[in-house]
Image (cartoon, grey):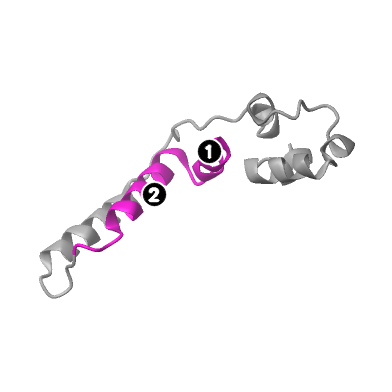
Amino acid sequence: MDKYKQISIRENYNKLLKSGMFWEFYPELSGVWNTDKDTLNGGWKPMQLKEINFEGLCGLCQKYIDFINDDEKYHEDNDYAHYIFEKTLETIYGKKIWNFIKNRR
């Protein structure tokens, strides 16, 4: 689906639509994001990877535990929860999960 690569992100889709040039390039589309989004992304929906390697996630969790346990380094204002969340999704679904999430907003 390389044909739609430039407009596979909602923001770019809307910019082109507002420019008035949308129909020049994509007359086959409806001009409605919710109708076209599956076509733009090839109908791809994330599925769990068949073989999941938890090594990176386990390593990140261990770093977090070590960080919490270190009184000199620990502070409540840290980004570990965010990093663990990201790593969890990437571990289970692969890095393409972010394309799916970005396009669904």
Q: Nearer the viewer, residue 32 or 29?
A: 32
Compare residues 77 and 95 and report the one nearer the observer. 77
Mark 2, Cα crowd under 10 Å, few <14 / some 14-19 / many 20+, is some
Looking at the rendered structure, the secondary structure element under dot 2 is helix
Q: Residue furthest right?
A: 24
Instruction: Say whether residue 34 is magenta.
Output: no
**Amino acid identity at mark 2:** Glu
Q: Amino acid at mark 1?
A: Arg
- Secondary structure mostly seen in magenta is helix
Q: Nearer the viewer, residue 34 or 79?
A: 34
Q: In the image, is 56 to the left or to the right of 21? A: left
Quarter of the image with the N terminus in it: top right
- Residue found 26% across the figure and 63% down from its top: 78
Secondary structure at badge 1 equals loop
Q: Quadrant of residue 13?
A: top right
What's the CA distance linking mark 1 and mark 2? 17 Å
Q: Residue at x 66, y 31 (%)?
A: 33
Q: Residues within 10 Å of mark 1 (few under 14, many from 20)?
A: few
Q: Confirm whether the magenta stretch covers residue 86.
A: yes
Q: How many marks?
A: 2
Q: Looking at the image, which residue is at 33% across and 53% down?
A: 82
Q: Look at mark 2 in the image and give the residue it sits on.
A: 86
Q: Which mark is residue 1?
A: none
Residue wearing tag 1 = 105
**From where the camera sits, is residue 21 visible?**
yes
x and y percent of residue 54 in the render? 33, 46
Residue 2 in view of the camera:
no
The magenta segment: 76-105
